Image: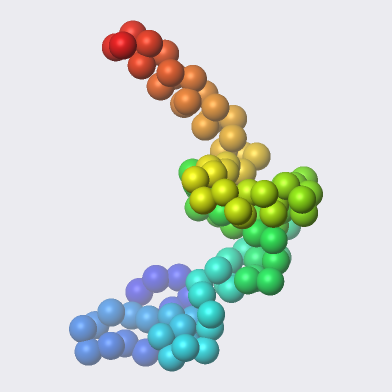
Amino acid sequence: MYRGCIGPVCRYRICLSVCDFLAMAGRIASAKDVEKCGQCSKVVSEKDNGLQCEFCDVWTHAACEGITEEVYKVLSRCEGAHWFCKKCNIGAMKMLKAVGKLDERIG
């Protein structure tokens, strides 16, 4: 069983949480509805301007990260855009620099 699990066990002995059960029943739009913001710990719902970090997979309200609505709209239109939360951004930049240096050595 995993966190928060209180509800039904399927015939394959896979334990399902109430949220999973309701999602399968079509009562919850998506898993994002129950994600909590990495900054304020409030729910990031479908109606919120939320971003998911590509490193830690944590959802964050755009406003909690200091991202304006204009910038959020641009990011949401860019299919290939990569976004990292403030906590992961430092590590991401270090990694990208290291990869760049390795590429120079190999190339």
Image quarter (top left, top right, bottom left or bottom right) of the N terminus: bottom left
- The residue at 33%/80% (across/down) is 15
Left or right: 68 in relation to 26: right
Which sits in the foreground, 37 or 61?
61
Q: Is residue 8 visible?
A: yes
Colour scheme in the image? Answer: rainbow
10 or 27, which lies in front? Answer: 27
Q: Splitting the image into 4 quarters, where does residue 66 fall?
A: top right
Q: Residue at x 58, y 72 (%)?
A: 34
Going by the image, does 69 lie left or right of 46? Answer: right
Question: Which percent across, then down, holds residue 7?
Answer: 42, 87
User: Measuring 49% from the left and 20% from the top, which residue is drawn there?
Assistant: 97
Quarter of image, res 59:
bottom right
Q: Does residue 92 appear to the left or right of 2 in the view shown?
A: right
Q: Please determine whether, in this image, residue 90 is positioned above or below residue 32.
A: above
Q: Residue at x 33, y 8 (%)?
A: 105
Total of numbered circles in the picture?
Answer: 0
Provide residue 98's location: percent of width, then percent of height: 44, 19
Quarter-wise, where is residue 60 in the image? bottom right
Residue 106 % position (x, y): 29, 12
Q: Residue 104: image x %, image y %?
A: 38, 11
Quarter of the figure that contains the C terminus: top left
Decide: is 20 above or below 55.
below
Left/right placement of residue 72 relative to residue 97 reads right
**Residue 100 drawn above or below residue 44:** above
Asked whether the viewer can see residue 64, the reply is no
Farthest residue to the left: give it: 12
